[in-house]
Amino acid sequence: MSQTRLLSVLVENKPGVLQRVASMIRRRGFNIDSLSVGPTEDETVSRMTIAVHVGRQQAEQATKQLAKLIDVITIDDITGMRNVAHELLLVRMHTPPDRRPEIFDLVEVFRGRVVDVASNTSIIELTGSTEKVDNFIELMRPYGIKEMARSGAVALVRGEQARIRLVDFDVAARAEREPAAVTGAAGDTTGTV
Amino acid sequence: MIETAAVTPLSEVASRRLTGAQIALETLVQEGVDTIFGYPGGANLWLYRWLPAYPQLRHVLVRHEQGGAHAADGYARSKRGAVGVVFATSGPGALNLVTGLATAYMDSVPVVAITGQVPSTAIGTDSFQESDVIGSTMSVVKHSYLITSVDDVAPVIREAFHVARTGRPGPVLIDFPKDLQAAATEHVRDDTPVRLRSYLAPPPPDSAKLRRVAQLIRDARRPVILAGRGVIIAQAEEELIELAHLASIPVGWTLLGTGAFPLQDPLALQMVGFMGAGYTNKAVCDADLLIMVGMRCDDRVTTRLDSFAPRVEHLVHIDIDPAEIGKNVVPHVSLVSDAGAALRALIPLVEPKREHEWLTQIDQWREEHPVRYMRRNGLLQPQEVLEAMYARCNDEAIVLADVGQNQIWAALWFNYARPGTFINSGGTGTMGYAFPASMGVKLANPSKTVFCVTGEGGFVMNMQEMATMVENDIDVTVVILNNASLGMVRQFQDDFYDGVRSAVDLTFTPDFVKLGEAFGMKAMTTGRLEDVGPMLDAAVAHRGPVLLNFDIDPEANVYPIVPLGKGMLDFVEAS
């Protein structure tokens, strides 16, 4: 059964890494729902958050094939974990003066923000889960969406500990990194990634 | 500025001002390279400017970059620990490497390709002979680098060799802009081991799983081992033999695993799969425990996936690449490990045993389904040529095969008793591979007899390398099995495409004797069995490259074969 899996991937911050990741995903026939990439606390490292629509065995293949790329440092399948996964939505709404209060009230309910107002349109900003953003868009549609831009999800797992740490060639750190294993229900396809 | 001072040997001097090209060549020497296959052009001329200053680097001028890539691949496959190196210029030169890189990638061969690129300031302007080589090769290399600073030249090359030769080996491409070949910097040789935080050696095999495998071996009634090229790469043939003997487990192999286990061993099966021996397929299909070591288990092994090993109760998969595990078949127990490390750790846990009934059954299948061919119409059979050729091979001789019928005949009709003695393009199935690759093999193994088995179709695809072979006096005997058609395609058309022969007739081929002689090769031809032996004797006695054309039965087919879309047990045998 296909589902959207959320992969949090730390990669070397080097030119061409995005193409390597995208190229591998295309070549292996996986479908990307969204992919976002940006800097991390370490300037040599970027974090990619990839939402990929795949079946279970495919998800494992996608993870392992990603892990094989030399510029991929660590990969963490955080699907179903307690995570914060947020998207950013910017939408330009048709907001003639007489409809503004009604629309802006809804923005308030969704904890969005009005970031630009012109005579007949406004830009609204909203962040949140994919589901929340989807719901907001559905609600806005009847009022007249002029255009919109939507980022892919970026995500971190909740709690005290960082999920994955960079390897510093220290044995302890290495041992900690190893259990990132995937075991298929039908058998043992375990591999360190 | 170009440094024009004479090059001193790798010296006591800690730091010297060198150009990017010099640093690259010094680093190749540092990595143990002694042979480079290459072709110069506008964007790599600084490398060639400095090449003569490094006489320890033998440069072989190929006649087409594809030939260079295959030669580097052959060099690496046939010399343990070696990395094949190929040079090409930008644009068309680099793009001509693509098939060769793909071939090395699919078969896990360590090759480093260094391509010239237009000056870094011109990249992206569609300047003369510019192409996006990194982008064009991305899916057929293990990794690739664009050099962006002359200070990166040595670190990038060292990293490239590290990536190419470790883990699951593979080709690595370095794109080297012309201006950075010319730029100078202070160079200090660095001998510290390369370490990458994103590329770690696999951990030792899991001990609990090893115990589980040992227990499965103890409990199995019908065990079978299948060995792939991973066993040969890991140099784990002794361990494989030891394990097989310890628990009396029959061993079969993949096309690329040929040579991993000696055929004359009583426990030997044969090649498995699509064109494997019937008795190997029967054993795999009846096995209750199947241990796959160092192999991908692709569709040429499994045939129709649901027909593969249907009675197996426990499937064990050992491979160094985690992505190969569970990709095609889902094992019950998996070990991500170098084949040698896994087998060495497993052997002490395995108890001696012998399943007499199972071995008797396998002996019976071996008798019922021998690998055989039929003599027909007084026409020369390819196997007759190969048998005569193999009679002139010792254990050490190396045989290359191209792709198609010649490949399967060459694989099945000889006892490759040692690893690395049979070399062919298994994964990509690259026609035209064997002939240029054989140059690399012979240069890496000057004391060994090297035969290159090919068809008249595949030979012509890279026949320009005859010039390279003659120029460098590379002593290879080329055996063309000439059936005046694209034989494997013709066989498929006859059997699986309604018998319509379409675009397979190669009656119009060159006169191979005249062709060979035009290039300066000794060349001979025959279609008669009685000439085969004397011709081969003359070829072996001759020092230097020889081209032998054998006109064989044009209707000779490959058997056994599993018809397309059918299962492992549906193999059709020679009759």
Image (cartoon, coloured by chain):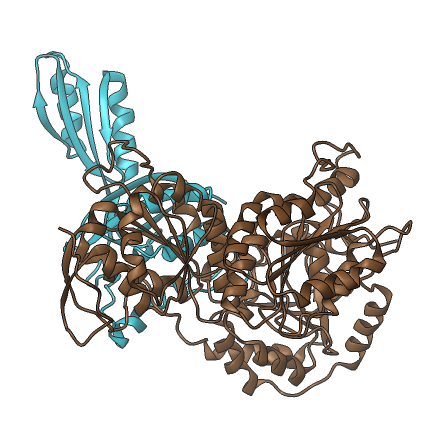
Chain colours: A cyan, B brown
Side (left or right) of B50 relative to B33? left
> Quarter of the image holding residue B574?
bottom right
Q: Position of residue A163 (x, y in %)?
A: 26, 61
> Quarter of the image holding residue B302?
bottom right
Q: Position of residue B553 (x, y in %)?
A: 82, 48
Q: Residue at x 44, y 63 (%)?
A: B169
Side (left or right) of B421 relative to B150? right
Side (left or right) of B329 relative to A27? right
Can residue B334 be seen in this snapshot?
no
Camera-nearest residue between B264 and B199: B264
Figure check: A54 above or below B11 = above
Q: Residue at x 18, y 19 (%)?
A: A93
Side (left or right) of B297 relative to A17? right
Q: Position of residue B389 (x, y in %)?
A: 73, 64
Figure check: B279 above or below B205 = above
Figure check: B477 above or below B348 = above
Q: How many marks?
A: 0
Residue that sits furthest to the right in the current view: B377
Camera-nearest residue between B191 and B321: B191
Can residue B28 be seen in this snapshot?
yes
Q: Residue at x 64, y 45 (%)?
A: B515
Q: Position of residue B140 (x, y in %)?
A: 44, 49
Figure check: B406 above or below B349 = above
> Quarter of the image holding residue B199?
bottom left
